[in-house]
């Protein structure tokens, strides 16, 4: 996590932006917003549509970002979620490379967390408790004995304010959410911005920003499930992760605190290896996860935007590279207990998609040896992840 001292003016700006968004700019009809200069595809900016209304009357909007090469990404205000990413295969045919749902009701329930932003603390906090500055905070235990992805109503379940942004680098939408002090048990009012930008280089860039008015903990990630073939399982995808170590877990998926070498284990993805090659290996950690569900300790310097993951899918020829400033990556191989009814009449089997959740390590608030996830007033949390799509012969 890179943090810089924030001036009062900057904090004021962030708060003002969030407030302005809450007040007016973000309550739009289904008219496409006109944003001068947004995007480089020669149009007026991202288009918006209302995809439904929640029981409390809140409308849910979805924006379509397009680029000059024809790539299309849709993102929605509920959970600031990625709903689809359509990229060309090696023959130029566009296909959706993330798992998704057909109906708003399915997006509301969303048990596997398809596409959403997870927070205030992505991944697990042991026992749903942590102590900060001498005060112990109690959170919901929504995953066995542990707290997962921000609790029963995490950032994935709230409707974010949205603002299309004119940028030079591509079409962009900024989502904002003000998480009240005490929400889901966390201290401090947290103002969060997540900006999605689609560039003409077929990059989907996520810029995260957060500020607080009292000491708290923050860990933000996106939970998209990728399948570069657009169908079937991901077991034949070749995956490379630039990590010499990973964090083994106990039976409830909480890190033991050890940073174990990947060398000689099914967790060694330092050279490209099919996801399925060792997914059923006789290894205690694979058994605990039911496949891969582990945090990798990324090589390089956290805070520097560096390429840490490369994926290649042989039949479509599609590739995906991930750059991040984060120190860790949860590689989750979609170990669904039962098939999930998905988009377009599809049924997603076990391992139909995989997540590359760039993050701080799970349970950091209880593990002093891990990089800190504490955010204090006057500091700003920033984090960037880039998903770069391409093809190979
Ligand atoms: C977690 C998994 C969990 C999945 C869906 C992942 O981030 O690591 O254990 O099943 O999210 O909640």
Image (spheres, grey):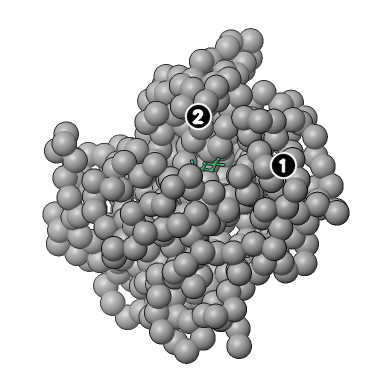
For the C terminus, give its image quadrant: bottom right
- Whole-percent x, y for residue 378 in the image: 55, 30
Residue shown at 49%/35% (left/top)? 149
Task: Return the disc, 1 or 2, that comes first in the chain's sequence.
Answer: 2
- Whole-percent x, y for residue 89 in the image: 48, 81
- Whole-percent x, y for residue 118 in the image: 47, 41
Q: Nearer the viewer, residue 55 or 102?
A: 102
Q: Residue 313: which disc?
A: none
What is the quadrant of residue 246 in the picture?
Answer: top right
For the N terminus, give its image quadrant: top right
Inter-mark Cα distance, 1 to 2: 18 Å
Residue shown at 69%/63% (left/top)? 277
Which residue in the protein does label 2 denote?
A: 143
Q: Nearer the viewer, residue 68 or 261?
A: 261
Left or right for 172, reference 292:
left
In the image, residue 34 sits, relative to residue 192, either above or below, namely: below
In the image, residue 129 sits, relative to residue 154, either above or below, namely: above
Q: How many marks?
A: 2
Label 1 with label 2: CB-CB less than 8 Å: no
- Whole-percent x, y for residue 140 in the image: 46, 21
Res 222 visible:
no
Res 287 visible:
yes
Which residue in the protein does label 1 denote?
A: 285
Tell me the SS state at disc 1.
helix
Indicate which label's residue lies in the foreground, 1 or 2.
1
Tell me the SS state at disc 2.
loop
Q: Is mark 2 within 8 Å of ligand 1?
A: yes
Residue shown at 30%/69% (left/top)? 45
Residue shown at 74%/26% (left/top)? 368
């Amino acid at each position: 996590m890179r943090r810089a001292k924030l001036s009062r003016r900057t904090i004021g700006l962030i708060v003002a932006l969030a407030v302005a968004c809450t007040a007016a700019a973000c309550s739009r009809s289904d008219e496409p917003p006109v944003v001068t200069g947004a995007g480089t595809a020669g149009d007026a900016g991202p288009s918006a549509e209302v995809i439904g209304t929640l029981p409390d009357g809140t409308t849910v909007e979805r924006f379509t970002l397009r680029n000059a090469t024809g790539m299309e990404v849709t993102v929605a205000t509920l959970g600031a979620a990625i709903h689809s990413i359509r990229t060309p295969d090696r023959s130029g045919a566009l296909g959706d490379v993330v798992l998704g749902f057909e109906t708003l009701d399915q997006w509301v329930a969303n048990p596997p967390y398809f596409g959403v932003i997870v927070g205030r603390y992505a991944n697990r906090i042991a026992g749903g408790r942590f102590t900060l500055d001498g005060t112990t905070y109690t959170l919901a235990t929504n995953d066995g004995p542990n707290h997962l992805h921000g609790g029963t109503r995490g950032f994935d379940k709230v409707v974010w304010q949205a603002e299309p942004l004119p940028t030079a680098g591509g079409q962009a939408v900024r989502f904002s959410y003000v998480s009240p002090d005490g929400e889901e048990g966390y201290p401090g009012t947290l103002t969060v911005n997540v900006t999605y930008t689609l560039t003409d280089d077929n990059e989907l860039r996520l810029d995260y920003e957060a500020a607080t008015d009292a000491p708290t903990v923050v860990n933000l990630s996106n939970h998209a499930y990728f399948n570069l073939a657009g169908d079937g399982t991901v077991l034949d995808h070749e995956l490379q992760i630039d990590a010499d170590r990973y964090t083994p877990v106990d039976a409830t998926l909480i890190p033991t605190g050890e940073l174990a070498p990947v060398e000689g284990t099914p967790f060694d993805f330092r050279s490209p290896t099919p996801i399925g090659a060792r997914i059923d290996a006789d290894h205690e950690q694979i058994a605990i996860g039911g496949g891969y569900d582990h945090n990798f300790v990324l090589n390089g310097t956290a805070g520097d935007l560096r390429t840490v993951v490369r994926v290649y899918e042989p039949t479509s020829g599609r590739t995906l590279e991930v750059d991040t400033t984060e120190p860790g990556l949860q590689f989750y191989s979609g170990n669904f207990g039962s098939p999930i009814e998905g988009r377009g009449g599809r049924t997603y089997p076990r391992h139909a998609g995989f997540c590359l959740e760039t993050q701080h390590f799970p349970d950091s608030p209880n593990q002093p040896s891990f990089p800190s996830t504490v955010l204090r007033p006057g500091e700003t949390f920033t984090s960037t992840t880039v998903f770069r799509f391409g093809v190979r012969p």
